[in-house]
Image (cartoon, helix red, strand yellow):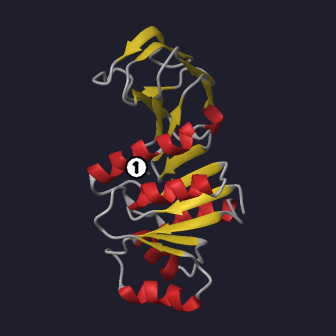
Amino acid sequence: MSKNTVIISGGILDELMVCDVLEKMDGSCIIGVDRGVEFLYRHKILPSYIVGDFDSIPEEIISYYRERGDVPIRAYNPVKDASDTEIAVRLGVTLGSEHIVILGATGGRIDHLWANVQSLMIPFMAGVEAFILDPQNRIRLIGEEIRLRKENAYGPFFSVFPLGETVRGLNIRGAKYPLRNHTLMPCDSLCVSNEFEEDEVVIDFSNGTVILMETRDRD
């Protein structure tokens, strides 16, 4: 089994971006999630697994994969205790993935987006690198010092938020708006839309879990 997993979820999917990611991560385990399965079906991309309650896609698509018989299908009752994307993330971790990219996790309903951001805690706690990716955003969780190189950044802006608990001793160096020993509260919007001042930004803190969003404007 590949150490890389790409999850195609049911939010907004940019065709060129999805195809580019799948090409760059050729050989990855591909998990289709509910309406994301329809995207894979329409583009003739064979998933490694299919998961979801399938209440958002035509029955003919699921029937197609059932008739093929070579794609494991994990169907769930719509009345369940976890979102389809969370189920896919847990599957990716269970399969032994070391790197998970989640596409189609943004756009549309904000409640779904926030649930997907929270689901990043599952691979994070398992020591698995995981990202939510769309054309404007790269979202991940960090629990220790990180160095962002301007040349490798996803965009010119970055924001940090605490996930759940207060983050203490937050330092941001090399940025337009530096911080030193800041206590970042869950209600604190101070760290939104920072920018690179130097070629490298260093973020570190003494405790807590931080949501790091690297962002860019629409072209």
Q: Position of residue 1 (x, y in %)?
A: 72, 63
Please name whichever residue, 17 or 102, is drawn nearer the observer in this view of the structure: 102
Q: Residues within 10 Å of mark 1 (few under 14, many from 20)?
A: many
Q: Residue at x 71, y 55 (%)?
A: 3
Q: Is residue 64 above or below residue 178?
A: below
Under mark 1, the amino acid is Asn
Residue of label 1: 116
Q: Position of residue 114 (x, y in %)?
A: 34, 45
Q: Is residue 139 above or below residue 20?
A: above
Q: Residue at x 37, y 56 (%)?
A: 82
Q: Residue at x 59, y 52 (%)?
A: 93
Q: Residue at x 44, y 46 (%)?
A: 119
Q: Position of residue 146 (x, y in %)?
A: 61, 26
Taking the image as drawn, is residue 207 in sight?
yes
Q: Quadrant of residue 152?
A: top right
Please name whichever residue, 58 or 106, is drawn nearer the observer in this view of the structure: 58
Total numbered badges shown on the rendered structure: 1
